[in-house]
Image: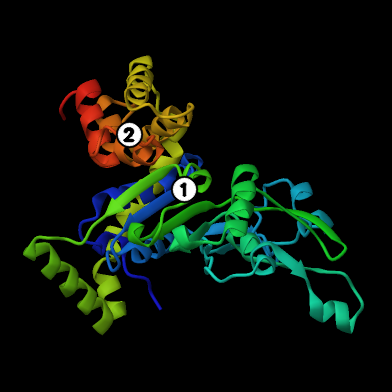
Amino acid sequence: MPAFPFTAIVAQEEMKRALLIAAVDPSVGGVLVFGDRGTGKSTAIRALAALLPKIRAVVDCPYSCAPESSAAECPHCARGRGKSHLIPVPVVDLPLGATEDRVVGALDLERALTRGEKAFEPGLLARANRGFLYIDEVNLLEDHLVDLLLDVAASGVNTVEREGLSLRHPARFVLVGSGNPEEGELRPQLLDRFGLACEVTTPTDIATRIEVVRRRDAYERDRDGFCAAHAKAEKALQKTILSARERLDAVTVPDTALEDAARLCLALGTDGLRGELTLMRTARALAALDGAEAVTTAHLRQVAPSALRHRLRRNPLDESGSTARVARAVEEVLGAG
């Protein structure tokens, strides 16, 4: 069943921009999307994965290893590699009720009982390697799974020690979470691991609402025809992403841009230097998408809310929300756009 085209999504520009940036440079650290139900969060994530070009992976490798990667990192490829083939970019859903065994992997009980062999059955983290791990209602995720994800997200390696098994395998993925803030807050440790945080809202103007309903209805009635009508735009955006990846390393970040990023983070009182790093990487990826040779103040201004709104300390003397505080600081430090 074809996914809803990314280029057919109406409005929600900040969310779409953040997902494209993560597709160009996964080192930005993933994307968190918070907002009302029914605002296209999961649709956009699946649409992006369908838009991305296929990746080359070793045949039969449960971790989708690239042929050029180090075989020593993978317990499957270390035993020898065969042919490679093209596969879609993995998009793996992590259900809220998933057990730890299902997430990290466990002993293959069937082989243990029938053959007496200790064999590893890969989990969701293995399937997500080189792709996206998507968690809907991430703010409701159980604490022990949050701790597990923090370790893997930081190292890019999943370590399994259980039932007599001791194994490490690659688990590098773009973490994408969505949720409704009314249902609970996200743990600060996990919140800090997301590079970008976006807010989505239900459209309030009649024209936008009508267009959303019209496109969704057209897609449901004739999915193949609707996707065919947007195929040209999808192909063009795919080329833009590929070109941005190729030119990313060539995009320069002038000292003036670094100074602006530092001044902005100081004005907002963000903890540590992760804010500056994310702001720089995000602005560089956006510049690559724009075809620019260097990061400009305009790029910083566009990505500052997504990169910084979730890194602010609570200020009991300031009742305005984090988005408003970032917008105010951007205007004071970078000037009006």
In the rendered image, is residue 40 in sight?
Answer: yes
Lateral position of residue 46 relative to residue 100, left or right: left
Q: Is residue 306 above or below residue 102?
A: above
From the viewer's side, name the closer residue of 284 and 41.
41
Q: Is residue 181 above or below residue 68?
A: below
Badge 1 marks a residue whose secondary structure is loop
Name which residue lies at 22% across and 38% down.
Answer: 324
User: What colour scheme does the image use?
Assistant: rainbow
Q: Residue 30 got which mark?
A: 1
Q: Position of residue 68 (x, y in %)?
A: 67, 47
Furthest toward the left, the residue is: 206
Indicate the amino acid at tag 2.
Answer: Asn
Tell me the residue that label 2 is attached to: 315
Alpha carbon separation for disc pair 1 and 2: 26 Å
From the viewer's side, name the closer residue of 168 and 35.
35
Badge 2 marks a residue whose secondary structure is loop
Q: Position of residue 10 (x, y in %)?
A: 21, 61
Q: Residue 20 got which mark?
A: none
